[in-house]
Image (cartoon, helix red, strand yellow):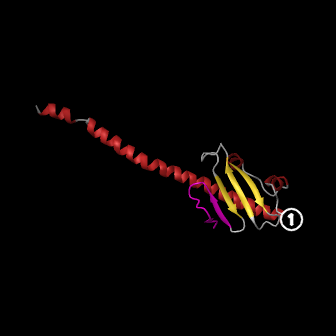
Amino acid sequence: MQNIFRKLRKGFTLIEILIVVVIIGILAAVAIPIYFQYVQKGYASEAKIAIKDIHKKCTIYSQQEGGEYPSDLDEVIAAGFYTMPKTLEANWTFDLAVDVEGQTGTITATGTDQMGGGDGKYVIYNVEFGTFSGNLEGIEEGADGG
């Protein structure tokens, strides 16, 4: 009789398996949105770094090419002051809307459809105040550009 009970006690019951599945589901429901927030923050950081680099290269370009801030990033690339990495070019398009002195205006990075974060995401850098804004996770309106 005891041999029968030992054979029945081996393995997991259906209830135990269902409880484990429910626990894994709850953990996944919490972890997946947090993961996507980190991915969004990564894309936002990529755009911020690229914008700061572009602004610096445009400033150098304006100092060496007659004192006027470029109206288009292609001018800076054609003059050899900036080389855009292929991954950055695939993920973002950049728009310069800065005055000729380079003191006021914005530089905008807009996500392409190839960016994992989604098409239409954007990051805006305010040149005058040195602040970022946009619709990517982790960017507050008027947040410090640090």
Q: How many marks?
A: 1
Quadrant of the rendered structure where residue 19 is? top left
Residue 6 in magenta stretch = no
Q: Where is residue 75 shown, x and y percent of the image?
A: 83, 54
Drawn side of residue 41 relative to residue 21, left or right: right
- Residue interval drawn in magenta: 130-146
Is residue 17 placed above or below 71 in the rendered structure?
above
- The residue depicted at 68 percent of the width and 51 percent of the height is 110
Q: Where is residue 88 shown, x and y percent of the image?
A: 69, 50
Judging depth in this view, the residue of 140 and 45 nearest the camera is 140
Is residue 103 placed above or below 119 in the rendered structure?
below
Drawn side of residue 27 relative to residue 139, left or right: left
Is residue 117 placed above or below 53 in the rendered structure?
above
Q: Which residue is mark 1?
A: 64
- The residue depicted at 84 percent of the width and 52 percent of the height is 78
Q: Quadrant of the C terminus?
A: bottom right
Considering the whole magenta stretch, tell me its main secondary structure. loop
Residue 131 in magenta stretch = yes
Q: Where is residue 76 shown, x and y percent of the image?
A: 82, 56
Drawn side of residue 81 relative to residue 28, left or right: right
Q: Report helix, strand or loop for mark 1.
A: helix
Q: Quadrant of the N terminus?
A: top left
